[in-house]
Image (spheres, grey):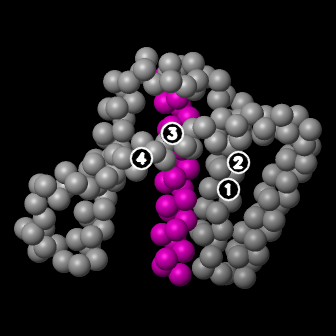
Amino acid sequence: MLDFLTKHFLVLSTLTIGVASAICMLFLAAYLAVFDWNLIWLIEYADLAKLFLIGTALLASVITTALNYLYDLLAWLRHQMKNYKWILIFGVVITVLLSSYSIFNDVKTGSSRTAYDVFRLMSTLMGIFLIYILLTEFEKWKQLRWLAIVNDLSLLVLALGTLAQRLVILSRM
């Protein structure tokens, strides 16, 4: 792990700075949205720098801890997936059938929850697919095959967009 961090320090530090800056901007936007946008004149650059440093420290510690636990979890899940493959397939089929029945019931009764149930099914399937990709292609991430990483991250963005659409529909109900 230390060898990986020293070899790719520039890329990792750039990613950390970018994500910490995004979190800082998100916090600032949430703060101003809750209180008042006229308060933007009270926020100084020193406050933003403090938020940025706090975000960077928090991200670095969380990422380091999560990567250690994630590697152990993936090794355990990869071993368990061989034993319980048919149970996983059966679970996915049951999930799809139950969600399909819920969608059918909403269409039949004219309920306003149809779009929500469709997006729930899509986000559930995308989540299952992302977990499957994580379990099967984690070695490509360790070997820094950038095309595989970009493809997996684009799938994650698509899944998050679908989940966000589902939450927007839920908030309008």
Q: Which residue carries the number 2 mark? A: 128
Identify the amino acid type marked 2: Ile
Reading the image, the residue beneath label 3 is: 64
How far is disc 1 from disc 4 in space, using C-alphas? Answer: 27 Å
Q: Residue at x 64, y 48 (%)?
A: 126
C-alpha distance separating marks 2 and 1: 6 Å
Residue 30: x and y, percent?
30, 68
Residues 115 and 12: in front is 12
When the figure is inspected, residue 89 is found, relative to residue 94, above or below; the finding is: above
Magenta residues, dominant SS class = helix
Task: First in sequence, mark 1 or 4: give its number.
Answer: 4
Query: Compared to 77, does 39 lie above or below?
Result: below
First in residue order: circle 2 vs circle 4:
4
Amino acid type of the residue tagged 3 in the rendering: Thr
Give the crowd class for mark 1: few <14, some 14-19, many >=20 residues within 10 Å: some
Q: Nearer the viewer, mark 2 or mark 3?
A: 3
Q: Which residues are magenta?
A: 146-173
In this figure, which residue is indicated by the disc labeled 1?
Answer: 124
Q: Are marks 2 and 3 in contact (CB under 8 Å)?
A: no
Q: Is residue 58 left or right of residue 3?
A: left
Residue type at mark 4? Leu
Q: Which mark is residue 59?
A: 4
Q: Secondary structure at mark 4?
A: helix
Q: Inspect the image, locate mark 1, and give the three-letter code of the amino acid beneath it.
A: Thr
* Residue 158 x/y as whole percent: 52, 47
> Does the CB distance between marks 2 and 1 fall below 8 Å?
yes
* Residue at the image position 41 percent from the left and 46 percent from the top: 59
